[in-house]
Amino acid sequence: VRNEGSNHRHDVLLGGRWSSSTSGERIDAVSAATEEVVGSVPCAGQHEVDAAVDLARRSFEDGTWRSTSLVERSAAVLALADALATRAERTAQFASIENGTPWSASLPMNGHGPSVLVRSLVEQASSLELRTTRRGLVREGTIVREPVGVVAAIVPWNGPVNLTLGKIVPALLAGCPVIIKAAPETPLTSYSLADALAEIGLPTGTVSLLVGGPEAGRALVEHDGVDKVAFTGSTATGRWIMERCATRIRRVTMELGGKSAAVLLDDVDLDTVLPQLLPRMTLLNGQACIALTRIVVPRARHDEVVDGLTDRLRALQIGDPLVPGTDIGPLVSQRQRDRVEGYIAAGRRSDASLVLGGGRPEACPKGWFVEPTLFAGVDNAAVIAQEEIFGPVWCVIPHDGDDDAIRIANDSPYGLAGAIFSGDRARGLALADRLRAGVVGVNGWSSDPGHPFGGFKQSGLGREGGIEGFDPYLETKVIVDHSEFEGS
Ligand code: NAD
């Protein structure tokens, strides 16, 4: 593979082949833990966007990819699982360096997980019915599910591989050519995915991967040659993209922000619950859309929960994400740390009590570290309880019984994830039905590629994963044969 040995890359994956970049601009890969530049890639500009869309458009119009059978496409895409597996450690290392994910989480998530995800999605696609015949009220019709067209997949830095695969694998299996716009914060991680995509040699035009900033994303969203935008990122950007797509009724799916609640009922055993809860709070150093960041607890047990959480958070190892045993790494960038520190300042100004953290860890003078920070006695109306912080900052919010707990959990513009913890399983399951969120756990939390994933309210639109995750990449057409009725 050209260039794969170097962390300074000069080519761009256009239509599945490496091409020389013409942009002239470059994006540095920066270690979040040391602030050092560890590599660089070309920054995609309008020229690359135009070239990628043109190649994808031609592939779509010529039928190069979409006229293949689902079985052929599945075989071609399955090769990606092996290509990713051979790069698993390298990809996971890049992700740890660039976005700060501790190695213990990065290896399964960015290293081994992607191949598992590809295999799972290919397996699920085998149950897709792309052509079926059924009788309507009067006549028989053939229901055809066709690829939606050229797909732009715009992704953030926190799950640079899996979030991309969650879009492009269903899109490719549906028969759509794709253009990935990867985040500028994780360029080498994304180039590792590009290497795997180049290796499997899909037909020309089928897949491009561009690393660039918001300008490249905007250029794609506004390009006439794009039929559908699959976006993961902030709600603010998602809103802008939806507005732009509205003018052409362009298809969109949105995986956006979250402010998810973990609701503890009065019968919980904290020794059981806190070890379950903690990893769901601290995932990706708190930079996870699905992180449980509002801990809604019985008022009578508030202090007990706060003490238990404080002890456990204090025991976490903060440091270089590549060092084994690190629990909390740095945030992705200075910009992200500024944002998180702004929220900590807002929390200090509120009526909440800061019980842990609030500053930068003394042992980490370099890198974008923030101490695990816990606010207690938080009013759910406070800014720190309503807005997504995207860092290691959590709110403990008292509730006055089950109904009040559900009211608080649902009193949010977001609705991505949620969890109910109870010593009584039936009570927990009954309350789970009342949470207005897309992915709900009882006495734990997990997501599974075989299940649909996505948000209620301002957390998103549409679903990824599961058989539902193919729907956004398929248009439905009905063909009715009138020949016999017309006497021909
Ligand atoms: P962001 O919205 O700033 O950027 C996301 C992507 O969009 C990046 O590739 C960025 O370059 C691009 N972009 C920015 N402005 C654009 C524009 N106007 N047009 C087109 N593209 C544009 O988000 P971020 O801060 O990088 O990522 C964190 C956010 O992502 C958080 O809000 C988090 O909750 C969300 N997220 C959601 C999910 C989910 O599945 N719901 C998963 C991960 C992250």
Image (cartoon, helix red, strand yellow):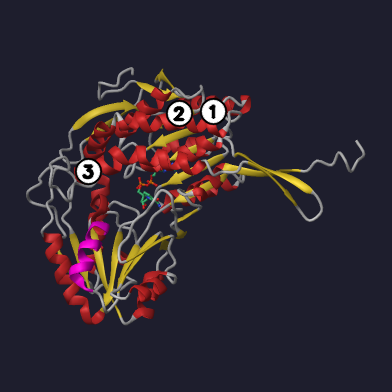
Our reading of the magenta stretch's main secondary structure is: helix
Mark 1 sits on what residue?
56
Is 88 rendered above or below residue 399?
Answer: above
Residue 344 in view in this figure = no
Q: Amino acid at mark 2?
A: Ser
Asked if disc 1 is less than 8 Å from ligand 1, the answer is: no
State how far apart marks 2 and 3 are (Cα).
26 Å
Q: Name which quarter of the figure residue 92 lies in.
A: top left
Mark 3 sits on what residue?
100
State how far apart marks 2 and 1 are (Cα).
8 Å
State how far apart marks 1 and 3 are (Cα).
33 Å
Give the magenta part as a residue range. 269-280
What quarter of the picture does the C terminus occupy?
top right
Disc number placed over residue 208 in the picture, else none: 2
Is 276 rendered above or below residue 269?
Answer: above
> Which residue is more in the foreground, 82 or 416?
82
Magenta includes 363?
Answer: no
State the image coordinates of residue 365 (x, y, percent, origin top left): 10, 45
Q: Amino acid at mark 3?
A: Gly
Q: Name which quarter of the figure residue 48 lies in.
A: top left
Kind of element beneath mark 1: helix
Residue at 17 percent across and 76 percent down: it is 303
> Which residue is more in the foreground, 231 or 342?
231
Residue at 30 percent across and 37 percent down: it is 186
Residue 52 in view in this figure = yes
Q: Amino acid at mark 1?
A: Ala
